[in-house]
Image: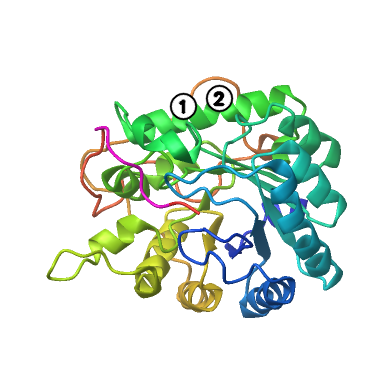
């Protein structure tokens, strides 16, 4: 898994929600056989990791108890691991992560960045597994009220920096840490576009960056029909592929997607054309500059991917409160 974190080729993480209420695929894979078959299919289509989640984190979602979440994910994790599929466990609970790791999961994908459960750092440290730290401000029920930023990119960067510092202080190895800007979590559509446009500023943190825009509601709003109705989730795949490809070109280490085959195909085209990077603007920047404070980056190494600065074609400026966009 250390090799995975240091991977030079983009990592595709396939989404497998074993929930009845996730925003896009809730209920499709509640059956064990269907879930395992889908996870195996995602691997065959190009997923390096299959991300198994047992609790929806869509805006407004109610929490489920730990026993319910554990009962949903453990059989799936166990079967996929036995089939040779590399699994990440999508959870904010240390107890669920610990059980999933014991069942064969190899990565913890924590949308709370360690904030929801202080014991998560111990579980990850003791397991020695990679830990995805996502930017997060609160649980789904109230996260829409937390979407207020002075500069969303600078604020997310600073808050992710604190999560990194806390993980390192808890003894988590630097070469096990991956960061995620948390599109849709306490973010408006404008915030999501700003984070996407200025992604190299987050790459400058020096850690592999996971990007997850797949099928989210801000894409549906972008693609709204003449009547203003957002495009349904099933019609957002091309936009998902586009955002994922742009993120990789901006320096992202990996992308979390529902449609693995289309994303893998697009990344194959990108690789065949020389892995071009997004160009920095010729005049002016909107960046915050390199992060100050303790030196980070796995094993003291350089930042992954592209350098700082704002890519051409940046979206509208964020910085106002509003409802969060779609999540898991």
Quarter where residue 103 is shown: bottom right
Image colouring:
rainbow
Q: Which residue is at the front of the view, 279 or 158?
A: 158
170 sits to left or right of 115: right
Number of other residues with Cα within 10 Å of mark 2, as a class: few under 14, some 14 to 19, many 20 or more: few
Q: Residue at x 77, y 61 (%)?
A: 77
Q: Secondary structure at mark 2?
A: helix
Quarter where residue 164 is shown: top right
Q: Is residue 68 above or below residue 41?
A: above
Q: Residue at x 24, y 67 (%)?
A: 223
Task: Identify the residue at the far left of this view.
Answer: 226
**Bounds of the magenta span?**
320-326
Q: Which residue is at the front of the view, 63 or 156?
A: 63
- Residue 208 position, x and y percent, is 59, 47
203 sits to left or right of 117: left
Quarter where residue 222 is shown: bottom left
- Residue 17 position, x and y percent, is 60, 61
Q: Residue at x 67, y 66 (%)?
A: 48
Magenta stretch: dominant secondary structure: loop
Q: Mark 1 highlights which residue?
A: 158
Assess whether residue 16 is covered by the magenta stretch: no
Mark 2–mark 1 CB contact (< 8 Å)? yes
In which quadrant of the rendered image does the N terminus lie?
Answer: bottom right
Can residue 289 be seen in this snapshot?
no
Q: Which residue is at the front of the view, 90 or 284?
A: 90
Q: Secondary structure at mark 1?
A: helix
Q: Mark 2 highlights which residue?
A: 162
- Residue 65 position, x and y percent, is 67, 42
Can residue 268 be seen in this snapshot?
yes
Number of other residues with Cα within 10 Å of mark 1, as a class: few under 14, some 14 to 19, many 20 or more: some
**In whole angstroms, how far apart are the C-alphas of marks 2 and 1?**
6 Å
């Amino acid at each position: 898994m250390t090799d995975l974190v240091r991977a030079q080729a983009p990592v595709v993480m396939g989404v497998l929600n074993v929930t009845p209420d996730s925003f896009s695929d809730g209920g499709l894979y509640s059956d064990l056989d269907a879930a395992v078959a889908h996870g195996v299919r995602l691997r065959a289509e190009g997923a390096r990791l299959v991300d198994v989640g047992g609790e929806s984190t869509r805006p407004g979602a109610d929490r489920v108890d730990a026993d319910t979440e554990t009962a949903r994910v453990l059989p799936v994790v166990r079967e996929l691991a036995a089939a040779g599929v590399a699994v990440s466990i999508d959870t904010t609970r240390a107890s669920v992560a610990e059980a999933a790791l014991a069942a064969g999961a190899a990565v913890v994908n924590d949308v709370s960045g360690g904030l929801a459960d202080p014991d998560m750092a111990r579980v990850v440290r003791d397991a020695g597994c990679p830990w995805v730290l996502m930017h997060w401000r609160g649980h789904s029920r109230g996260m829409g009220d937390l979407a207020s930023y002075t500069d969303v990119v600078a604020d997310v960067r600073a808050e992710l920096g604190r999560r990194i510092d806390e993980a390192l202080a808890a003894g988590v190895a630097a070469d096990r840490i991956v960061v995620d800007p948390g599109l849709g979590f306490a973010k408006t559509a404008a915030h999501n576009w700003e984070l996407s446009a200025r992604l190299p500023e987050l790459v400058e943190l020096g850690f592999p960056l996971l990007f997850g825009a797949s099928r989210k509601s801000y894409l549906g709003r972008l693609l709204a029909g003449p009547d203003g109705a957002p495009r349904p989730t099933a019609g957002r795949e091309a936009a998902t592929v586009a955002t994922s490809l742009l993120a990789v070109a901006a320096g992202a280490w990996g992308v979390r997607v529902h449609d693995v085959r289309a994303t893998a195909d697009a990344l194959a085209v990108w690789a065949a054309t020389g892995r071009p990077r997004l160009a920095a603007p010729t005049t002016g920047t909107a960046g915050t500059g390199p992060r100050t404070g303790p030196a980070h980056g796995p094993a003291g190494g350089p930042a992954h991917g592209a350098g700082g600065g704002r890519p051409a074609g940046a979206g509208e400026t964020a910085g106002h409160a509003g409802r969060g966009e779609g999540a898991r």
